[in-house]
């Protein structure tokens, strides 16, 4: 029984470590500053899409729509974990994205124009003490359906070759439809100091799903929100 409990405890530690190791927290800053009760805004997401596009696709409109969708997605991810603080997390008040965007639209021509501005400056426009600055860059090579079809064909070819040469292990390369770089940082608006940041793993063969990155930030970054 003791052995089972020990194994279970070790698994919990391993899972907790794997969840948080890609989230950097500025401990030197956190040792000197309290974040309790501060206001937090999730800014409109900066979106850049390059490469292949469909004939009838309006890339400008697509980037605009994706910006707001990702902003709301991260907001919902925080609400789903509301009231469940992780180790060392401090409680903050999360501002509604519609209110944040409305305040920004009173200051600038359109929300897209804030993408290139310093996050701390945009945060002050939104009336927030802290902001999440998110940037996504996508390089498209082909459609997802085409990539799926190619990979299915490669899998079948690999199986045929391995059956003919049972002693050999064939490792066919995986074809990607696109490369996605997703960057997310928690920033103080008064100083521009980065408090928490997601660290991409360059050795990953596949891009980590955005929902998984968001979940790691919500659970391991310096702040949480109440119910």
Image: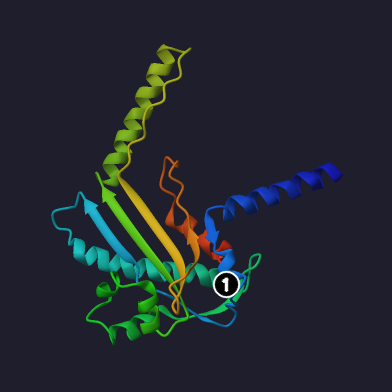
Residue 212, above or below 75: above
Q: Is residue 185 among what the camera can see?
A: yes
Give coordinates of residue 82: x percent, y percent: 58, 73
Please indicate whether residue 47 sits to the left or right of residue 6 in the image: left
Task: Residue 137: give x, y in percent of width and height.
Answer: 31, 56
Query: Label 1 belongs to which residue?
Result: 224
Observer-nearest of 137 and 167: 137
Q: Colour scheme used in the picture? A: rainbow
Please state which of residues 41 and 129 is positioned toward the viewer in this rendering.
Answer: 129
How crowded pointer 1 is (Cα within 10 Å; few <14, some 14-19, many 20+) is rated as: many
Nearer to the camera, 137 or 189: 189
Residue in the picture at 21% in, 67% down: 61
Quarter that holds the N terminus: top right
Q: Is residue 168 above or below residue 100?
A: above
Name of the residue lying farthest toward the left: 55
Residue 12 coordinates in the image, percent (x, y): 69, 51
Identify the image quadrant of the C terminus: bottom right
* Residue at 39% over, 75% down: 120
> Of all residues shown, which one is farthest toward the right?
1
Up the image or down, 165 lies above or below 27; here it is above
* Residue in view at x 34 percent, y 72 percent: 118
Q: Is residue 1 visible?
A: no
- Does residue 166 sit above or below 41 in this rendering? above
Say whether residue 69 is left or right of residue 95. left
Query: Is 140 situated left or right of 159 in this image?
Result: left
Which of the 4 quarters of the picture holds residue 121? Answer: bottom left
- How many marks the image carries: the answer is 1
Give how far across and how far down residue 213 sits, in percent.
Answer: 48, 57
At mark 1, the secondary structure is strand
Residue lying at 34% horizontally and 34% vertically, measured from the top left: 151
């Amino acid at each position: 029984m003791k052995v089972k409990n020990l194994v279970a405890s070790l698994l919990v530690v391993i899972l907790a470590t794997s969840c948080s190791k890609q989230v950097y927290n500025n401990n030197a800053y956190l040792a000197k500053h309290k974040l309790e009760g501060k206001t937090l805004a999730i800014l409109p997401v900066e979106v850049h899409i390059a490469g292949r596009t469909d004939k009838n696709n309006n890339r400008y409109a697509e980037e605009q729509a994706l910006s707001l969708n990702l902003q709301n997605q991260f907001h919902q991810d925080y609400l789903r974990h509301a009231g469940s603080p992780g180790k060392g997390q401090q409680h903050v008040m999360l501002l509604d994205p519609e209110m944040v965007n409305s305040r920004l639209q009173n200051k600038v021509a359109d929300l897209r124009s804030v993408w290139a501005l310093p996050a701390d400056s945009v945060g002050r426009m939104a009336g927030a003490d802290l902001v999440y600055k998110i940037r996504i860059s996508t390089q498209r090579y082909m459609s997802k359906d085409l990539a799926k079809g190619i990979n299915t064909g490669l899998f079948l070819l690999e199986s045929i070759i391995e059956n003919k040469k049972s002693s050999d292990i064939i490792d066919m390369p995986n074809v990607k439809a696109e490369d996605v770089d997703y960057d997310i940082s928690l920033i103080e608006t008064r100083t521009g100091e980065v408090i928490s940041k997601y660290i991409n793993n360059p050795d990953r063969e596949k891009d980590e799903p955005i929902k998984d990155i968001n979940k790691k930030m919500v659970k391991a970054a310096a702040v949480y929100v109440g119910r």
